[in-house]
Image: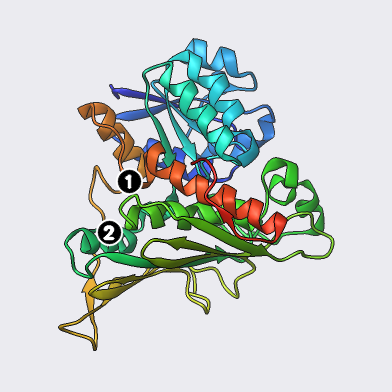
Amino acid sequence: MPRWKVAGINFDHFHMGDLLRMVHDHPDAEIVAIADEQPERMAEAASNFGIPSNRVYSDIEPCLIETEPDLVILCPAAARHAEWTERVAPFGVHILMEKPFAASLAEADRMIAAMEKTGKQLAINWPLRWQPVHVMAHELIQAGTIGEVREVHFYDGNRGPLWHGADKIEKEPTAAAKDASWFYKKAEGGGSLLDYLGYGTTLGTWYHGGRKPIEVMAMWDEPEGLEVDEHSVTVARYETGLSKFETRWGTFSDPWTHQPQPKCGFNIVGSEGTLANHDYAPVVSVQTRDCPEGYDVDVPPLKAPFANPIQYFLHCLDTGSPVEGPLDPRIARIGQQIVDTAYQSATEKRALPLVGE
């Protein structure tokens, strides 16, 4: 019998389908329930994973009481992460929240507080964390290959959040779909900055070894007819220098099919060398003082139980270990501090000290 019971609650974000597939494929886990206030959004998952109708809920409390999951996956709109964490946490479950951490630092802190009351773990999932190329970059940094990290440069995004669904199945977005989607609603935490900046600032904090910036300045576009941005640029000043984080809905192509130009991913500058770890790349490109012409480091596939967030989180629960790296709320909180400061900076059109200090 599977040792871990998992429920998927709130299907606002289509990544729920990807995460449920990981549970379905895990030998020690089972999907005991799915729940959403809009039942039609669960139909595809129920069919894909053979979830019986008596395990498909439109009400959250009966779902949690009757199925008693150990772990709940939450995929609500960004502006509702705190609300949903506070609704689910009292049932004594561990929570995996799909990115971003939250729509604001205050909401992130509410999530941390809600989980601290229960003694259960909260993990924030960032899909970029599970790309082998980005893991290898961190290993090279930890090994001292490029010395002290001084700059992290991030450019990432895709053609837009409505161009694909679960399992990266392509879709053709319509104007009506944009009008209906939370991704394009300011009140729901929409926009490319809130959608993608946390990737760069959270993994960037991981690469920076937990270092915080001193001040942040950001700018975003203001597309006609939309209430949220589709392009943002954030510059963060650290004691070691400047780092840059750029988000884009509307890349020329999706990076998982054809890398656009600029390439999506990271370029990292250290005191003794540089790294280029672009999304989905089979190698990390390295420069060092001993080899300024550069060389490539092959990237092996990630191995269980470290190949995806479900494997990793359940491994942590099995061993009684805290989650680490970008999934750790302490690292993700620093990323959220930068996001909050960037959002305020773009609104006020000026540089600001890091919020929450």
x 58%, y 14%: residue: 61
Amino acid type of the residue tagged 1 in the rendering: Gly
Q: Position of residue 179 (x, y in %)?
A: 80, 51
The furthest residue to the right: 225
- Taking depth in this image into account, of 183 and 302 the one nearest to the observer is 183
Q: How many marks?
A: 2
Query: Image check: 55 left or right of 276?
Result: right
- Taking depth in this image into account, of 193 and 3 the one nearest to the observer is 193
Q: Position of residue 129 (x, y in %)?
A: 37, 52
Residue ID for mark 2: 138
Q: Position of residue 132 (x, y in %)?
A: 30, 59
Query: Image check: 291 left or right of 276?
Result: left
The furthest residue to the bottom: 293
Q: Residues within 10 Å of mark 1 (few under 14, many from 20)?
A: some
Asked if the residue at tag 1 contacts the one at tag 2, i.e. Cβ–Cβ closer than 8 Å, the answer is yes
Mark 2: secondary structure? helix
**Where is 51 relative to 20, above or below?**
above
Q: Residues within 10 Å of mark 2 (few under 14, many from 20)?
A: many
x 60%, y 57%: residue: 164
Q: Position of residue 168 (x, y in %)?
A: 53, 57
**Where is 331 relative to 177, above or below?**
above
Residue ID for mark 1: 325
Amino acid type of the residue tagged 2 in the rendering: His
Residue 238 visible, this angle: yes
* Gap between marks 2 and 1 measured at Cα: 10 Å
Query: Image check: 138 left or right of 187?
Result: left
